Image: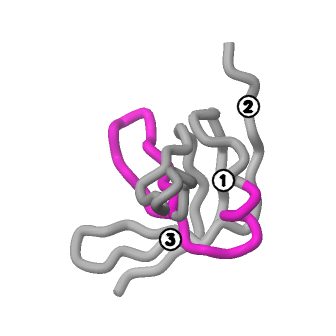
Amino acid sequence: MDKHQTSINGIIIPVDWNTEGKALKIAIVTFDEDTVMVADNACCRSLMNHIRKTVTVSGEISIINTVKKMRVEHFEIHQNI
């Protein structure tokens, strides 16, 4: 498993929902069409309030098989124009 610190830009999207339609898991889709799952932590739970917003996230990313997952340590929401 490869792990390293990085920052990425993209759009927050839901990837799993409960029976009431509330997002349970999110990912960041980058502008080069890569998808990075977001690990559950306090930053992830805050990001869930900004679905479909543009964001820059920083943290530790790991790659297992072909799945990229980031433990977000810092984020900045950008104003969508």
Q: Residue at x 38, y 81 (%)?
A: 2
- Secondary structure, mark 3, is strand
Task: Identify the image quadrant of the N terminus.
Answer: bottom left
Instruction: Please name the residue that numbered disc 1 is placed on.
Output: 48
Residue 8 coordinates in the image, percent (x, y): 56, 49
* 36 lies left or right of 70: left
Instruction: Please name the residue that numbered disc 3 is placed on.
Output: 61
Q: Is residue 44 above or below residue 28?
A: below
Along the line of sight, the residue nearer the viewer: 22 or 26 = 22
Tell me, yes or no, whether the highlighted magenta stretch contains residue 34. yes
Along the line of sight, the residue nearer the viewer: 44 or 64 = 44
Disc 2 to disc 3, how far (Cα)?
Answer: 21 Å
The image shows a total of numbered marks equal to 3
Disc 3 to disc 1, how far (Cα)?
Answer: 19 Å
Along the line of sight, the residue nearer the viewer: 36 or 7 = 36
- Badge nearest the viewer, 3 or 1: 1
Q: Between disc 3 and disc 1, whose residue precedes?
A: 1
Mark 2: amino acid: His
Residue 52 coordinates in the image, percent (x, y): 57, 34
Q: Residue at x 68, y 20 (%)?
A: 80
* 48 lies left or right of 19: right
